[in-house]
Amino acid sequence: MTDNALQIEGLTAGLGDHQILKGIDLTVPFGEIHALMGPNGSGKSTLAHVLTGHEDYEAAGSALVDGVDILGMSVHERARSGLFHAFQYPVALPGISLEKLTNEMEDASEEGDVETRAIDAAERMRMEPFLDRFVNVGLSGGEKKRSEMYQLAVAAPTVAILDEIDSGLDVDAVRDVAEMVESMRNRQRGVLVITHYNRILRYMTVDRIHVLVDGRIVESGGPEVAERLEAEGYKTR
Amino acid sequence: MPSFDHDAVSAAGANDAPWRAATRSAAHDAYLATAMPDESEEIWRYIELGFDLDDYGPALEPGVPLDGDPLLEVSHPAVAGRLVDGYWVGDDVEAAGVTVGSLDRSSSTEPELVESVVTGAGLADRRDRFALAATAFGGDGAFVHIPKGTVAPGVIYLETQATKPGSTSFPRIVIAVDEGGEASIVVHFRSRQEDDLTVVPQIVAALGDNANLSVTVVQNWGYATRALGNTNVVVGRDAALRFAEIGLGGKLARLHLDVRLEGRGSSANIVGAYFGDKEQTLDYRYFMRHIGTNTRSDMFLKGAVEDEARSVFTGMIRIENSGQKTEAFQTNRNLILSDGASAQSVPNLEILANDVRCGHGSTLGPLDAGQRYYLMSRGIGEQQADRLQVHGFFEEALLKLPQPEIAGPVREWISNKFVAAQVAGRV
């Protein structure tokens, strides 16, 4: 095991000729939760999709998950290498129940304890009523986020990227999700929470905050960074 | 092999009740005067028949039965019977007041009942060459009678086989569910993969007031079989029909469904799932007629085509001016899995009443890239992600099957068709 769950260096990515990420360096050590903040259009979600391997983006540089570069891998190989992406807008999977999905995750995994985690997490996260329901079909915004967090618990990844996991939630649901994120903190894991507002950060302990503006990390620091952004807003630094 | 001639009419009608004999010779005259249908007729649009019925003479007796029906056991039937090349094989069965047996015998012992079901369902309105041939050359069939207030003690299973290469057989299933009766019927169509033959299956049902009937047809004809079927159902007051068809086999398999919601408060739930592969043509023409007030219907069909397969769904909801307070919906969704495959989806509404709620939806498209990406982001490989997506697509229909016990094998057969296409590199 290396020191860093995620280590991104010189990452550039774009759609055709349109460059969106312009050289990202970002490291999340094992056991830490980091936040990535930035204004709309700064490239936060692009970073999440580039790491996941979305075929629309052309990427260069490196992104290491526990020392292994995932950039050349297909989407499912990256997941099997320990990357998990909780989507901002998870798609509906009509006809596929949440239980069916986690069973398939288990079949696809090389580990033996996925099923145990699925059972434990379903109980701990009170997900039983959702297991028979189709994934993200007819769910509220908060329920979709819970479903994503449940899948994260089942996957038990090395790196968890949570994209706008707090968007569209009322204050109770934000607190609920924040507690779930906190519970995912683990010495075998690094977590990167992507958020536009610092609202969710009030309910969890974040080790470090990175500010993304126009495809570049312009600042990294402790929780005080979020406080100042709240007061001053994002301005080009 | 016999021909479609006078001798065949006489042989097929050897056991006719008088009412049946009268329709037979008239249908033969009409048959001789009627050409094979072609695409110029709206009801035959979008498909090429590409054969002449005259090349497949009528089956005038049952052949050697096929054994090993994989669906029979999982259905756990209370009553099981078998039609081979259109002929009832074995004894009639009576269980808990329910009779299941030979149509010929019933046509003689209960002529008025059988005649009223057959004529009442409008089968005689079908004047195409196949329907006329069925009336002129059809022999036996199956008759199911659920008397007044009787609930059938479990699934009634009717295996329907075609076994004679070069023949046309005319399996006819006539179902009478009297007032307040209830029945659940599974029909399994089978023939050998390699047997080049034609089948004209006909299912005719009449539901009395407050009756409940569920019928699921699992169409598993072999790849060299052409099937041109009719299903006609009349639904009485406050009666409920559930009908499902699973389309798997056939070189060409067509079903013309005609449901008449005649009684006030009657309803019909229609489900379909079909998967056309290689060079199959699967053809559905569904007509839902709302005649009574306060009637309700829902059609929900999901289909997939790959390689050079084609499918057709044309759905017609017709609401007569007597059909006030009607609710009627139809949905047909199609997966087009290969560039060479095609699907037609043509929903129609014809509304003569003014106080109704209707809706229809129709989609055609490939597998969804967003779903594939999401599934792969969970560590699931691309091929398995696509299998899951196909599974989910059909699951929405299969969960509506009236007999959940047969969903297991049906799910597996559909999945096998997709996996075979993947393995062959066609999807």
Image: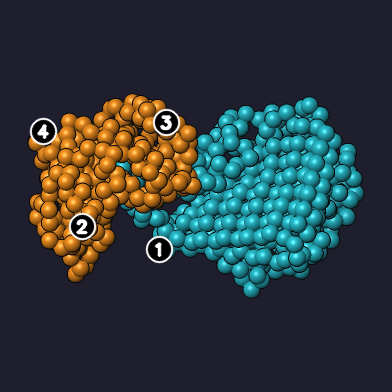
Amino acid at dot 4: Met
Closer mark to the observer between disc 2 and disc 4: 2
Quadrant of res B282:
bottom right
- Residues indicated by labels 4 and 3 sit on the same polypeptide chain: yes
- Residues indicated by labels 3 and 2 sit on the same polypeptide chain: yes
Amino acid at dot 1: Asp
**Residue at 77% in and 53% down:** B294
The chain that appears cyan in the image is: B
Amino acid at dot 2: Glu
User: Residue A232 shows which numbered tag?
Assistant: 2
Please give the chain letter of the residue carrying mark 3: A
Quickly name the residue at label 3: A126
Mark 2 residue crowding within 10 angstroms, few (<14) / some (14–19) / many (20+): few
Closer mark to the observer between disc 3 and disc 2: 2
The chain that appears orange in the image is: A
Mark 1 residue crowding within 10 angstroms, few (<14) / some (14–19) / many (20+): few
